[in-house]
Amino acid sequence: MTFLLYLVMFFLLLNVFAMAQSLIRDSCKKAAYQNPKIHYNFCVKSLEENPQSKTARSLDRLVMSSTKNAVSKTTSMKGIVDKILKENRYEKYSEKPLRDCLELYSDATNSLTEALTIIKSRDYKTANVVISAAVGAPPSCEIGFKEGKEPLKSPFTKDNDVLFQMILIPLAFTNMLK
């Protein structure tokens, strides 16, 4: 009898994961179709690696987990820049773009955190607007290194590309729900 119970539980869990995987793939496909800047494979991989996303049964749960992913990455980027500035590990001309990036990441973190609260209330239209405010942080950070007396190579290009994708995903998902 116990074996039968375990078997049933195993198949139920398997079904939940399969359903979530299908939801992730379908949602990412639709998001990438609606916004060509979203890379389908990145979308799927980033959500399938997230335990919260793997058990999601609806798009609104994916919105929540993808926004949390974006908050986490933005907070991480903010910490990296802050550490570089505190340890004075930067070239003479790069202090201004570093400080600008720090401010951009701080603002993006605040916007995304606010969006989480709004998402909980299921106001996806407002959440979409608030997430939109954060999406400009990675490209603006990159531009800051290219402007100035001496154009500099940004140390964050790869991370900013990832962050940009991570913010685009909940932006696209909230757009589907509004």
Image (spheres, rainbow, N blue to C red):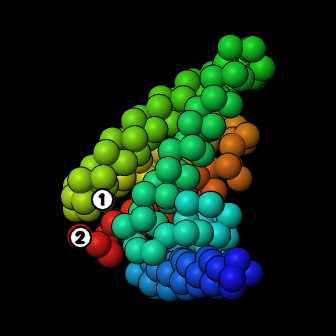
Distance CA(mark 1)–CA(mark 2): 8 Å
Up-down relation of residue 73 to residue 6 (above or below): above
What residue lies at 55% left-to-right and 24% top-to-bottom?
99
The answer to whether marks 1 and 2 mark residues whose Cβ atoms lie closer than 8 Å is yes
Q: Please tell me whether mark 2 sits on a helix, a strand or a loop.
A: loop
Asked if residue 171 shows in the view, the reply is yes
Tell me residue 72's x, y (percent).
Answer: 57, 43
What residue lies at 58% left-to-right and 32% top-to-bottom?
78
**Quarter location, residue 52:** bottom right
Q: Is residue 119 left or right of residue 53?
A: left
Up-down relation of residue 173 to residue 143 (above or below): below
Up-down relation of residue 118 to residue 14 (above or below): above
* Residue neighbourhood size for the residue with mark 2, other residues' Cα within 10 Å, grouped as few (<14), some (14–19), many (≥20): few
Q: Is residue 49 left or right of residue 114?
A: right
What residue lies at 55% left-to-right and 52% top-to-bottom?
69
Q: Is residue 56 left or right of residue 122?
A: right
The residue at which mark 1 appears reads as 128
What residue lies at 62% left-to-right and 60% top-to-bottom?
51
**Quarter location, residue 152:** top right
The residue at which mark 2 appears reads as 178
